[in-house]
Image: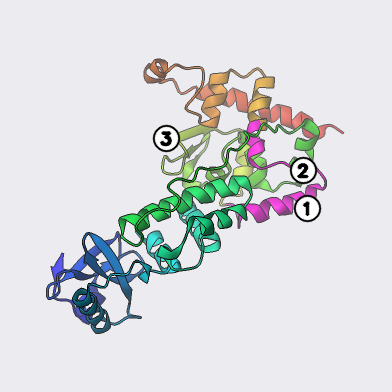
């Protein structure tokens, strides 16, 4: 899109998915419009150089700077500050709300604060070493995606993380004992009790909306599930009672878990995801067939072969319902134990 840029034209540009309007009088100069900001850019040799955000930087000031750089062939990589690039990156991404929050938190809190082109592998590894291994691997992925975007936009000449591998992590196998599960259950708010009763992922459970709930089931839309497939599970009387607390009030999961640890008292380290593993283990104790358990957990894997998954469209709704009822009965007995 090309127009004669002036303040009225710029003010009328609609925000939304990122697009660029080029100046008819200076073809390589334009303004990039995103969901939250309008930024002046200069394009040279398939690279974009940020000149400033409108209206903090005015049109005349940005156009004069573009002309100066073109005349002097002055296109410095170090012209972009990491914090500015992070804001542009987040505006440019079409992410789920939870992912957007994760990327923002990781980049704003842990990515080095300096000129983007001046950041070295040492700066990045130092930032990653400050984090626990599991968090460091997640931050590594976020950093790498951001730096790849910066490379494509011409803000850097190479991705310093390109050759750095993640740390190897040991797969967790923690299953809570009956006594531990009992302690946690009595200390838990409805959201955590729903994780215990259903074995669903914590982020998907916390996001449940009233519209997803029918009289006999919960349906998670594909936009929110990990495997991008719509997922429906039956509900039981106990689960329906917990669903009356939707929408759940939740700040950060780390604060949520810390408060829960203070209530439960001394206990071997456990995570909220361990509740999902414990749920699956207890279904096996109750002789629930593996393929039924996998359906409840919304796993792609299971007893069914790839060919069987194509042709076997039976949803196992009644089998899942019976499994969840059996699990509820077992939990009720456990909670009544001394």
Q: Residue 211 versus residue 285: which sits nearer the camera?
A: 285
Residue that protrudes farthest toward the right in the picture: 338
Judge left or right: residue 178 versus residue 72: right
Stretch of the chain drawn in magenta: 248-277
**Residue found 52% across the figure and 32% down from its top:** 233
Judge left or right: residue 282 versus residue 67: right
* Crowd rating for badge 1 (residues with CA inside 10 Å; few <14, some 14–19, many 20+): few
Spatial CA distance of label 2 from label 3 is: 33 Å
Judge left or right: residue 237 versus residue 312: right
Q: Residue 189 versus residue 56: which sits nearer the camera?
A: 56
Residue 257 vertical placement versus 215 (above, below): below
Q: Choose the circle earlier in sequence order: 3 or 1.
A: 3
| SS at circle 3 | loop
Q: Choose the circle earlier in sequence order: 1 or 2.
A: 2
Residue bearing mark 3: 229
Q: Position of residue 85 (x, y in %)?
A: 40, 65
Q: Choose the circle earlier in sequence order: 2 or 3.
A: 2
Which picture quadrant has residue 15?
bottom left
| SS at circle 1 | helix
Residue bearing mark 2: 186
Looking at the image, can residue 149 be seen? yes
Pointer 1 with pointer 2, Cβ within 8 A: no
Residue bearing mark 1: 262
* Crowd rating for badge 3 (residues with CA inside 10 Å; few <14, some 14–19, many 20+): some
């Amino acid at each position: 899109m090309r127009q004669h840029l002036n303040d009225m034209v710029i003010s009328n540009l609609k925000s939304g998915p990122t697009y660029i309007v080029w100046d008819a009088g200076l073809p390589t100069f334009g303004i990039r419009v995103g969901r939250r900001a309008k930024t002046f850019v200069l394009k040279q040799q398939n690279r974009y150089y940020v000149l400033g955000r409108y209206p903090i930087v005015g049109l005349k000031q940005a156009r004069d700077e573009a002309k100066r750089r073109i005349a002097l062939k002055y296109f410095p990589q170090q012209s972009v500050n990491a914090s500015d690039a992070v804001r542009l990156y987040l505006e440019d991404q079409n992410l789920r709300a939870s992912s957007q929050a994760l990327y923002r938190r990781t980049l704003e809190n842990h990515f080095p604060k300096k000129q983007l082109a001046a950041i070295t592998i040492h700066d990045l590894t130092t930032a990653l070493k400050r984090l626990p291994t599991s968090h460091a691997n997640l931050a590594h992925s976020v950093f790498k995606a951001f730096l790849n975007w910066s490379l494509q936009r011409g803000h850097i000449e190479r991705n310093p993380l390109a050759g750095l591998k993640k740390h190897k992590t040991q797969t967790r196998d923690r299953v809570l004992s009956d006594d531990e599960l009992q302690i946690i259950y009595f200390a838990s708010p409805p959201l955590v009790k729903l994780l215990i009763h259903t074995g669903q992922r914590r982020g998907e459970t916390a996001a449940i909306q009233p519209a997803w709930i029918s009289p006999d089931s919960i349906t998670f839309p594909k936009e929110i599930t990990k495997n991008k497939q719509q997922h429906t599970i039956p509900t039981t009387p106990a689960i329906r009672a917990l669903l009356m607390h939707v929408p759940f009030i939740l700040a950060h999961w780390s604060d949520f878990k810390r408060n829960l640890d203070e209530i439960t008292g001394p206990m071997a380290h456990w995570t909220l995801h361990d509740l999902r593993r414990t749920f699956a283990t207890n279904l096996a104790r109750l002789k629930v067939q593996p393929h039924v358990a996998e359906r409840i957990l919304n796993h792609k894997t299971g007893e069914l072969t790839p060919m069987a998954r194509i042709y076997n469209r039976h949803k196992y709704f009644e089998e899942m319902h019976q499994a969840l009822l059996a699990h509820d009965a077992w939990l009720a007995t456990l909670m009544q134990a001394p």
